[in-house]
Amino acid sequence: MKGKIWRNRILRSLKFIYIKLFRIHDTPQRIALGLGLGVFLGIIPGTGPLAAIFLALVFRVNRAASLLGSLLTNTWLSIVTFLLSIKVGSAIMRVSWQDTRQNWIEFLKNFRLRDLWQLSTLKIIWPVIIGYLVVAFFLGAATYLIALIIVRQKKRRTQ
């Protein structure tokens, strides 16, 4: 019984998002760019809905789509994107991702602000930062391309 209720809530939420996205009165490019920007900012830790709205204003893309993209990815994908970011960043910097992950966990357990700028700390932080930027960029770009195709097709059908 509970499973059916949750499934209905999820389906209703997805339908609501779908309807809101396609009823936006804007160009397909601005909608897709807003969604891609929101996904990018939703993946980057420390950013979120407010940053998505602010940067949507700065870049003159659709604010509603940007907010939607940020909300869709902000907390839902945190664990997946964290692990993926560690792996990608470690691969780019040519270090072991297991060591980076373990060092990151130790760093967070024993966090002190004065240790933040030590060279050993930067060796832990850089792979994660680079990984997040790369993962966020590719997921944001993929979201942009997919949204652009879908929104264009949907707008052609309604005209």
Image (cartoon, rainbow, N blue to C red):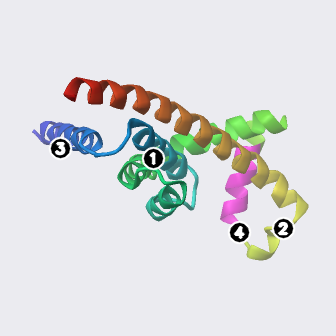
Question: Label 1, label 4: how many angstroms apart (C-alpha)?
Answer: 35 Å
The residue wearing badge 3 is: 9
Secondary structure, magenta segment, majority class: helix
The residue wearing badge 2 is: 117
Percent of width and height locating residue 136: 59, 42
Question: SS for tag 3?
Answer: helix
Question: Label 3, label 2: how many angstroms apart (C-alpha)?
Answer: 45 Å
Viewer-proximal residue, 106 or 59? 59
The residue wearing badge 4 is: 111
In terms of sequence position, does the residue under pointer 1 or pointer 3 come before the other? 3
In terms of sequence position, does the residue under pointer 1 or pointer 2 come before the other? 1
Question: SS for tag 2?
Answer: loop
Type of the residue with mark 1: Gly
Type of the residue with mark 3: Arg
The residue carrying pointer 1 sits among few (fewer than 14), some (14 to 19) or many (20 or more) residues within 10 Å by Cα, namely many
* Extent of the magenta region: 100-110
Q: Is residue 22 visible?
A: yes
The residue carrying pointer 4 sits among few (fewer than 14), some (14 to 19) or many (20 or more) residues within 10 Å by Cα, namely few
Question: SS for tag 1?
Answer: helix
Question: Label 1, label 2: how many angstroms apart (C-alpha)?
Answer: 34 Å
The residue wearing badge 1 is: 34
